[in-house]
Image (tube, rainbow, N blue to C red):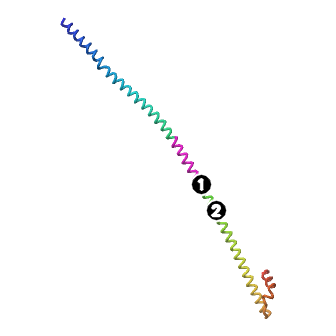
């Protein structure tokens, strides 16, 4: 009986310990495990959400970068076209200016040629008068013979 009483005492102590553990020890442990499981699940969900947001943000950034590249290329092309048109415009103005300068130089050369011809005509007329005077040995009056001298100028 001694064995039965010890066994029975051990069973009673075991049941009391089991009851105490289930009543006071086990609930905080299960509560802590459940809380930990909830936090891990929330962390995993947050990580998945963050990955999705990161992927979305990366797509937005790539789209913005592509748009910025396109905008930069468009602006560069516009600037090149503007520069080309400015160069062409400057060339056109330079050609016009050169044509004006050439025309002015030609006109000036023509006027100088006309003036030189007039001066030469005057000199030739004067020489002709002097030659005729020397030949005739008399003085020719330019005022009297003005019409004759102007006809002579026009013929020369």
65 to the left or right of 131:
left
Residue at 38% from the left image edge and 26% from the top image edge = 38
Quadrant including the C terminus: bottom right
The Cα–Cα distance between marks 1 and 2, rounded to whole angstroms, is 16 Å
Q: Which mark is residue 93?
A: 2
Q: Which residue is mark 1?
A: 82
Q: Badge 2, how many Cα within 10 Å: few under 14, some, many 20+?
A: few
Quadrant including the N terminus: top left
The magenta region covers 63-82
Q: Where residue 100 sits in the image (x, y, percent)?
A: 67, 67
Label the magenta part by its dominant secondary structure. Answer: helix
Residue at 32% from the left image edge and 20% from the top image edge = 27
Residue at 50% from the left image edge and 39% from the top image edge = 60
73 to the left or right of 5:
right
Of labels 1 and 2, earlier in sequence is 1
Q: Where residue 109 sits in the image (x, y, percent)?
A: 69, 74
In the rendered image, the vertical position of residue 134 relative to residue 59, given as above or below: below
Residue 73 painted magenta: yes
């Amino acid at each position: 009986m001694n064995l039965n009483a010890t066994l029975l005492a051990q069973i009673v102590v075991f049941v009391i310990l089991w009851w105490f553990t289930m009543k006071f020890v086990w609930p905080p442990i299960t509560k802590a495990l459940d809380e930990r499981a909830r936090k891990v699940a929330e962390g995993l969900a947050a990580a998945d959400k963050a990955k999705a947001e990161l992927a979305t943000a990366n797509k937005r950034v790539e789209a913005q970068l592509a748009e910025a590249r396109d905008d930069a290329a468009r602006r560069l092309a516009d600037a090149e076209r503007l520069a080309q048109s400015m160069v062409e415009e400057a060339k056109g103005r330079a050609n016009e200016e050169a044509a004006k300068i050439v025309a002015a130089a030609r006109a000036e050369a023509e006027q100088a040629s006309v003036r030189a011809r007039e001066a030469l005509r005057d000199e030739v007329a004067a020489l002709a008068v002097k030659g005729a005077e020397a030949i005739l040995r008399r003085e020719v009056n330019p005022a009297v013979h003005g019409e004759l001298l102007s006809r002579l100028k026009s013929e020369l």
